[in-house]
Image: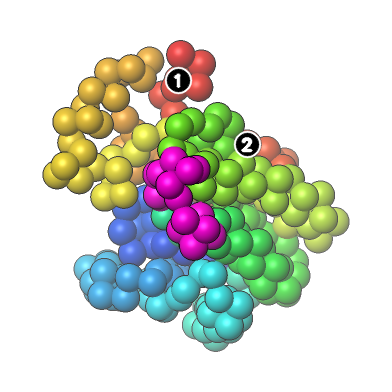
Amino acid sequence: MARLRGKTTLITGGARGLGAEITRLFLAEGAQVMVTDILEEEGKKLVSDLGYKPKFLKQDVTKEADWKEAVTVTEVAFGPIDVLVNNAGVVLYNSIENMSLDDYLWVVNVNQVSVFLGMKYVLPSMKKANGGSIVNISSITGFKGGPGGAAYSSSKFAIRGLTQSAALEFAPLNVRVNSIHPGAIDTPMLVQEDTKDAVAEFAKTIPLGRIAQPREIAQLALFLASDEASYCTGSEFVVDGGSLIK
């Protein structure tokens, strides 16, 4: 359908998992995609497998200099940025008592500070494009904390406030900002050899009886990135199989 025909898109954390699925779907819908990730080898392999239609740039999303470079390189390759997907993220579970400050700040910097930096440095490019859409990937843990989740959950809660504040600031510029809150997703971050059994047991507690496939989250990102969501901003979109209401 080419729902993103001609739109210049920057996707962080795009080398694998959800980011890679968003990349594939956006390309299929006509977008010009810059994939960034700190995982250089995996990022380069992804764009090679996709026929070099997207481009890849190694980026540490916690660094201002890397954000400036990402915006510049994307504009040179494709023109002003229409869509930003702040997808990069890490997870670390530990009790507050046993978690070091360095570990806590690592999660906050990657999951939260990167979203702030992304919106800050992409906005001037979206002004050139006369508008745009920013999609911030949060989590259902941004609504409900739990034991061991202090770092991850607090970073995902923060994305909600960042999204709402940016939506109000950017609305006069025709830039929409929304957040997506997935539940458990079948990605390498969650499903590993030593976690498969635990994930299978957890899936039984989800009302829909399974964890999400990456494409199911990517479809929501596509909607928010497209002109179909032209009246959506500052909103929180939960896609969790009913986990929050169980």
Residue 27 shows which numbered tag? Answer: none
Chain-order first, disc 2 or disc 1: 2
Q: Amino acid at mark 2?
A: Glu
Query: Which residue ends up furthest to the right in the rendered image?
Result: 172
Q: Position of residue 187 (x, y in %)?
A: 29, 46
Q: Let me know if residue 162 is in the magenta part.
A: no
95 inside magenta stretch: yes
Residue 242 circle label: 1
Foreground of the two, 153 or 236: 153
Position in image of residue 74 (x %, y %): 53, 78
Q: Position of residue 226 (x, y in %)?
A: 57, 50
Q: Residue furthest left?
A: 193
In the displayed structure image, the side of residue 104 where residue 232 appears, left or right? right
Q: In the image, is 6 to the left or to the right of 176?
A: left
The residue range painted magenta reads 91-106
Residue located 25% across and 75% down the image: 41
Q: Is residue 216 visible?
A: yes
The colour style of the image is: rainbow
Which residue bears the numbered disc 2?
236
